[in-house]
Image: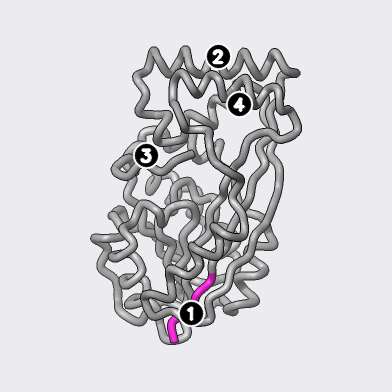
């Protein structure tokens, strides 16, 4: 789905649904991250945009302290409760741009499907400043793609989007070129030892589950309510007409960069 700047506030309006419907990340991603930089009980990590906490538990399980910076008040409440058993976990309710942290303090700063909301020229220098020498910035995100196994259904859904959200479904599957370009951004801001990884998986949904997921996407949330109901009803009808299930093909990219 396209990114529309200025809609970051929308996610907090459906925080509970977001926490339930948005996916976690694959174990291999964390294995690669921890091979790149060992994280343990002595480490300090900062998460930018925790959302529903989909990326947080594997970091907490290392025993390190985690401070999350989260713009949404409801997301902050959900995650304080969700991770209450971890005494070294805390949430600061703030935009990352406004967050005041100690320079050179963090061993790891990571962000999952959230850093695109932070202006590049603010976000990268701030991450660089907050990291220790040798500290690591890990940026990762999930990129879902249409159901490649049910082409007729995908075409039917595209026709519905052409009416309600023209151009929203167009575009190619996320791949090496996009991940490499995203990774190279860090070099402009002084980071070194830059690398990236790609991971793949599928997720399947029944019709109503799928529209519940769509209801957590910012550009869908801002559609007028009655129009959105018709839009989602037509998508559900199309899915049910072609067997009642839709599968998304996810590509997850991980970019890693080090502060020298």
Q: Residue at x 41, y 43 (%)?
A: 3
In the rendering, at what x and y percent does residue 192 appear? Answer: 48, 81
10 Å crowding of disc 2: few (<14), some (14-19), many (20+): some
Q: How is the image coloured?
A: one colour
In contact (CB < 8 Å): disc 3 and disc 4: no
Q: Earlier in the sequence, mark 3 or mark 2?
A: 3
Foreground: disc 4 or disc 1: 1
Q: Earlier in the sequence, mark 2 or mark 4?
A: 4
In the rendering, at what x and y percent does residue 83 appear? Answer: 50, 54
Magenta range is 256-260
Does residue 93 lie above or below 61 as drawn? above
Q: Secondary structure at mark 3?
A: helix
The C terminus lies in quadrant: bottom left
Residue of label 3: 12
10 Å crowding of disc 1: few (<14), some (14-19), many (20+): many
Residue of label 1: 258
Apparent side of residue 139 relative to residue 245 in the rendered image (left or right):
left
The label on residue 234 is: 2
């Amino acid at each position: 789905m396209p990114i529309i700047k200025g809609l970051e506030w929308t996610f907090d309006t459906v925080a509970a649904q977001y926490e339930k419907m948005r996916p976690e990340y694959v174990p291999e991603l964390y294995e690669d991250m921890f091979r790149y930089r060992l994280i343990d009980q002595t480490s300090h990590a900062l998460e930018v945009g925790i959302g529903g906490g989909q990326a947080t538990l594997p970091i907490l399980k290392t025993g390190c302290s985690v401070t999350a910076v989260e713009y949404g008040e409801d997301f902050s409440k959900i995650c304080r409760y969700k991770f209450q058993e971890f005494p070294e976990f805390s949430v600061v309710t703030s935009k990352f741009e406004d967050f005041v942290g100690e320079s050179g303090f963090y061993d790891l700063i990571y962000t999952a499907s959230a850093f695109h909301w932070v202006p590049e020229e603010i976000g990268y220098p701030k991450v660089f400043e907050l990291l220790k020498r040798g500290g690591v910035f890990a940026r990762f995100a999930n990129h879902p793609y249409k159901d490649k196994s049910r082409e007729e259904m995908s075409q039917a859904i595209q026709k519905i989007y052409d009416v309600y959200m023209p151009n929203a479904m167009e575009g190619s599957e996320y791949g090496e070129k996009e991940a490499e370009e995203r990774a190279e951004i860090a070099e402009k801001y002084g980071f070194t030892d830059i690398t990236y990884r790609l991971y793949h998986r599928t997720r399947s949904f029944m019709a109503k589950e799928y529209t519940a997921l769509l209801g957590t996407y910012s550009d869908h949330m801002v559609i007028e309510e009655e129009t959105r109901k018709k839009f989602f009803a037509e998508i559900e009808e199309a899915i049910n007409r072609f067997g009642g299930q839709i599968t998304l093909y996810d590509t997850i990219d991980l970019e890693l960069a080090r502060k020298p």
